[in-house]
Amino acid sequence: MKLFLATLLVCSLLLGSSFLEPAMAAPIFCARKCGVRCANAGYKDRCLKYCGICCSECKCVPSGTYGNKHECPCYRDKRNSKGNPKCP
């Protein structure tokens, strides 16, 4: 009985940690990708803010510091209230 409970506890810990990892990895992924994307931006704080918003919604960021938006259609197609591209 003790072996069963110990096995159940270990399995539940392993299963629980696998659900937490993707949620914790997303902000790190976005911060790293947006840091690269906004490296040459004139208004870096604003670039990082909007890139982070777009990354969290789209789960991707185009490579490089400019262009390449074809790599991430969701990121490319996001628009602000004026109809201009939302994502840097």
Image (spheres, grey):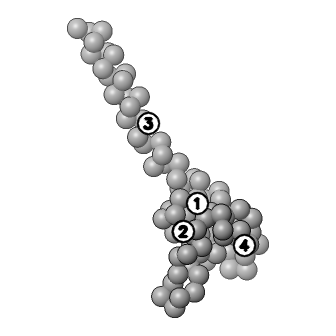
Task: Tell me the crowding category of disc 3: few under 14, some 14 to 19, or many 20 or more residues within 10 angstroms, Cα based.
Answer: few
Which of marks 4 and 3 precedes in the sequence? Answer: 3
Q: Residue at x 74, y 64 (%)?
A: 64
Measure how far apart labels 1 and 3 are at the Cα level: 21 Å
Which residue is disc 4 drawn over? 67
Q: Can I make out residue 25 in this image?
A: yes
Task: Tell me the crowding category of disc 1: few under 14, some 14 to 19, or many 20 or more residues within 10 angstroms, Cα based.
Answer: many
Which of marks 3 and 1 precedes in the sequence? Answer: 3
Q: Amino acid at mark 4?
A: Gly
Measure how far apart labels 3 and 4 are at the Cα level: 35 Å
> In the image, which is nearer the foreground, mark 2 or mark 3?
2
Which of marks 4 and 2 precedes in the sequence? Answer: 4
Kindly state the secondary structure of the residue where label 2 is placed.
helix
Q: Amino acid at mark 2?
A: Cys
Decide: marks 3, 4 in contact (CB < 8 A)? no
Quadrant including the N terminus: top left
Measure how far apart labels 2 and 4 are at the Cα level: 14 Å
* 47 shown above or below 82: above
> In the image, which is nearer the foreground, mark 3 or mark 4?
4
Decide: marks 2, 3 in contact (CB < 8 A)? no
Which residue is disc 3 drawn over? 18
Which residue is disc 2 drawn over? 74
* 15 shown above or below 70: above
Which of marks 3 and 2 precedes in the sequence? Answer: 3
Counting from the top left corner in percent of width and height, residue 56 is at 50, 62
Measure how far apart labels 2 and 3 are at the Cα level: 27 Å
**On the picture, is 5 further left or further right than 16?**
left
Q: Which mark is residue 60?
A: 1
Q: Name the image quarter holding residue 87.
A: bottom right
Which of marks 1 and 4 precedes in the sequence? Answer: 1
Q: Amino acid at mark 3?
A: Ser
Q: Can I make out residue 52 in this image?
A: no
